Image (cartoon, grey):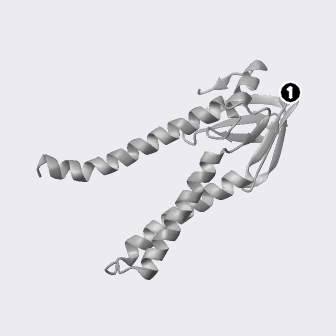
Amino acid sequence: MDLEDFLSKALPPFLVAFAVSLGLAYLNRKAKEDSSDGKLGYGPEIKAFGWVAMTIASGTVLVMLFVDHGGQYLPLAGIAGMFGIIGLYLLVESYSTRGHFDDQQIYISSIWSKPKRGLWQNLDSASFKKNGQYFELVFNDGTKIGLSKVLRGHGAVCTHVESLGVRVEGV
């Protein structure tokens, strides 16, 4: 394999991976720096990723139905299914997750679990879960509240938690 072949095959996936890495770094920085005024929720970037994924899935289905693709149904169905699932998850998560916090309490609701509320005076611990990339607040009544790193307002919550004298472990 000569250099030209190698570059033509290896460069596009590398550029996509690099662009995705830059996008995730931007989302993390944006979510951390965003002044939330006590509001917790996903920004328009996550919603846009969801809509883009759904558009790719829909476009792939249209290609399967109306374009001569040489019988490549299985790969096209895999692409449509993958982007459809990712897009649906991102849209459901970003439009359904809402929360707020103030000096007394934190409240968050999502489609994936019942609404959760915790009083800051009852906060036992706070930690960062590296595998899931989220912050977990544990209260003495057993309530656990998870805040994704890309959830806008998570940085303000961590600052508030540390101002209460609770160290956020694992950061």
Up the image or down, 134 lies above or below 33; here it is below
For the image shown, how many numbered marks are present on the structure? 1
Residue, x 64% and y 57% (percent of image)? 91
Up the image or down, 171 lies above or below 76; here it is above
Up the image or down, 44 lies above or below 54; here it is above
Q: Quadrant of the C terminus?
A: top right
Residue at the right extreme? Answer: 104
Q: Nearer the viewer, residue 108 or 12?
A: 12
Q: Nearer the viewer, residue 149 or 46?
A: 46
Q: Position of residue 162 (x, y in %)?
A: 72, 21
Q: Position of residue 11 (x, y in %)?
A: 28, 47
Q: Secondary structure at mark 1?
A: loop
Residue 129 seen in the current view: no
Q: Position of residue 140 (x, y in %)?
A: 82, 34
Quarter where residue 168 is shown: top right
In-image side of 149 versus 102 (left or right): left
In-image side of 139 versus 92 (left or right): right
* Label 1 sits on residue: 103
**Which residue type does callout 1 highlight?**
Asp
Residue, x 39% and y 78% (percent of image)? 73
Up the image or down, 10 lies above or below 60; here it is above
Pointer 1: residues within 10 angstroms few (<14), some, or many (20+)? Answer: few
Residue, x 34% and y 81% (percent of image)? 71
Q: Position of residue 26 (x, y in %)?
A: 53, 36
